[in-house]
Image (spheres, helix red, strand yellow):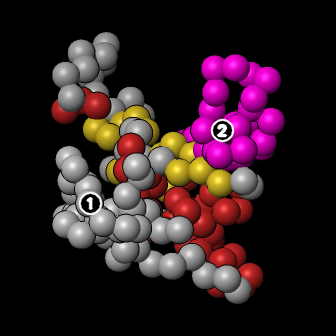
């Protein structure tokens, strides 16, 4: 089920699904600005893929004996200019090689039973929260008290109660 009523449906055809993953890996959201080379795409540095075992309902339990179902969790985010976020200036000053670090955008967190499905969900979220040029999109914000089924009548996000 989609995380938001306006999110694009994940395609069922294999060729379209492969296109989604290839487009995800090349998306400008993973670009690191670089004065010498222009923008450098570094999908692998921006996307953390974590194979895990969870309960059958997809939730991780403190009791490891209950975590018997395999899943892939993904955390991701664009590069962040850390020189603008209170980091102390390194010896020699800031440059293209020390000023950017991959961030963690909680809105992009996702998971699935296998890597292919998890990457499709990540693409769905990237296309919802980011523009084609990699900049963050102005979009809906989750309510404090969602109502409705399956999507909130106010904000449109999937209700999880």
Viewer-proximal residue, 1 or 47? Answer: 1
Q: What element carries label 2?
A: strand
Is 64 inside the magenta-drawn segment? yes
Q: Is mark 1 on a helix, strand or loop?
A: loop
Whether residue 47 sits left or right of residue 134 in the image: it is right
Q: Mark 2 points at which residue?
A: 50
Region rendered in magenta: 44-73
Q: Compared with residue 48, is residue 4 higher up or lower down, i.e. above or below?
A: below
Horizontal side of residue 31 vs 147, given as left or right: right
Q: Position of residue 8 (x, y in %)?
A: 45, 78
Residue 88 in view (yes/no): yes
- Expressed as whole percent of the image width and height from the top left, the position of residue 147 reads 26, 60
- Crowding near pointer 2: few (<14 within 10 Å), some, many (20+)? few
Q: Would you say the residues marked 2 and 1 are in contact, meaning their CB atoms lie under 8 Å apart?
A: no
Q: Distance between the residues labelled 2 and 1?
A: 32 Å
Label disc, if present, on residue 147 of the rendered structure: 1
* The quarter of the displayed image where residue 3 is located: bottom left
């Amino acid at each position: 089920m989609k995380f938001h009523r306006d999110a694009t449906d994940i395609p069922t055809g294999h060729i379209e699904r492969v296109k989604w993953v290839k487009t995800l890996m090349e998306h400008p959201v993973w670009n690191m600005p670089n004065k010498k080379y222009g923008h450098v795409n570094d999908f692998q540095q921006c996307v953390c893929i974590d194979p895990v075992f969870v309960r059958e309902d997809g939730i991780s339990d403190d009791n490891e004996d209950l975590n018997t179902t395999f899943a892939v969790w993904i955390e991701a985010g664009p590069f962040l200019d850390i020189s603008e976020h209170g980091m102390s200036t390194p010896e020699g000053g800031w440059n293209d090689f020390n000023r950017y670090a991959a961030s963690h955008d909680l809105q992009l967190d996702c998971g699935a039973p296998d890597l292919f499905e998890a990457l499709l969900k990540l693409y769905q979220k990237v296309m919802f929260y980011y523009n084609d040029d990699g900049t963050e999109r102005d979009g809906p914000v989750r309510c404090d008290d969602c109502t409705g089924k399956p999507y909130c009548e106010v904000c449109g996000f999937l209700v999880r109660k």
